[in-house]
Image: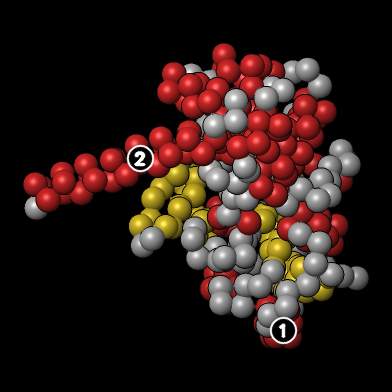
Amino acid sequence: MIPTPEISVIVPVYNAEAYIHRCINSLLAQTFDDFEVILVDDGSPDSSGAICDEYARKDSRIRVFHKENGGVASARQLGVDKARGEYTIHTDPDDWVEPTMLEELYYRAKTETADMVICDFFVEENGNNSYRVQKPTNNSAEAILDDLLFNRLHGSLCNKLIRRNCYVKNGIRFAEGLNTSEDFLVCLKVLKNNPKVQYLNRAFYHYVQNVNPNNITGQYSAETYRMHKLLIGEMINLLKGTHNDGLMHQKCCIALLCMSKPLLTSEEFKQECVGEYKELLPHIKSRKMRFLFRLSAKGYKHQAIAVLDAENALRRALRHIISIFKS
């Protein structure tokens, strides 16, 4: 009989040969022993798949699955489908974790009979390491769902230990083709079913930014914008007339992010946003951003970006001048 581990760690892998060693080594260094690592090679053209196989040959806790490239959502889904643990957690291949992560999350889950345990995390960027507190407004699933919609909490699955049965009994799956914020949507789906949630005020996960050029999270393109539009549609369908303020906040964030970057031409932005900008406008709190969004929706997106670029350049210059006087 195949032993059932307590925790399944799911790692979607794509073109990560330069980073995957650190990730896997940090998982194998856990103080908690009863876990499996599921490495899902999403058709990587580099040596990532071979590296995964080599680790599996050396450590029986590692299971590797190779698939044709289908995007991170399909890789995460395969990992969940293959998982055997009572709990699951996700780790991205360019990130790494502290050695007590699984032990401390599992202890909190078992002592509190929790379906989900949320913890803090670190962000590593350009040599700086910052601590991100993820304390919810309260531990009710409804409040945490609102916290996610208003961006008070991060929607990643990498800082959340989740009982696998939350996926199974509620038929929760990753949305096919949604390869950005796919974990955010799954978090909403889990919370929609009112799990018991606990918060642990410790950080274990190191979220490394600006290292892996294949990480779609670090990129923003016209394709990403349209995936975010798909995400909004999925959220509206999921929440069915509830959490309208949070959904409107998400719509505004996506529209403003698109407006502030040269992703679409002025004409494309006008065509895609003009139908809804009047709906969004009253919900954009900044007077400046309301003006620039209105300008963009009328076909003058490049001019709006020029204003933002000039403002950012001025801020950088002022910070540089201040640093000179302080030195």
What label sits on residue 50 in the rendered view? 1
Residue 163's disc is: none
The N terminus lies in quadrant: bottom right
- List x then y, in percent, for residue 119: 54, 44
Q: Nearer the viewer, residue 166 or 316?
A: 316
Q: Is residue 31 left or right of residue 324?
A: right
Amino acid under disc 1: Ala
User: Residue drawn 81% across and 51% down?
Assistant: 177
- Which of disc 1 and disc 2 is earlier in sequence? 1
Q: In the image shown, does 201 or 259 lie closer to the viewer?
A: 259
Task: Give the CA separation, mark 2 to mark 1.
Answer: 47 Å
User: Where residue 75 appears, x then y in whole percent?
Assistant: 78, 61
Q: What element does badge 2 sit on?
A: helix
Q: Position of residue 286 (x, y in %)?
A: 45, 21
At label 2, counting other C-alpha atoms closer than 10 Å, the crowd grade (few under 14, some 14-19, many 20 or more) is few
**Lateral position of residue 269 relative to residue 100, left or right:** right
Amino acid type, residue under disc 2 in the picture:
Ala
* Quadrant position of residue 194: top right
Image height check: is 93 above or below 299?
below
Give the crowd class for mark 1: few <14, some 14-19, many >=20 residues within 10 Å. Answer: some
2 and 1 marks in contact (CB < 8 Å): no
Give the camera-side residue of 181 and 162. 181
Q: Is residue 148 visible?
A: no
Q: Residue at x 38, y 60 (%)?
A: 126
Where is mark 2, residue-wise?
A: 310
Above or below, 229 against 96 in this view is above
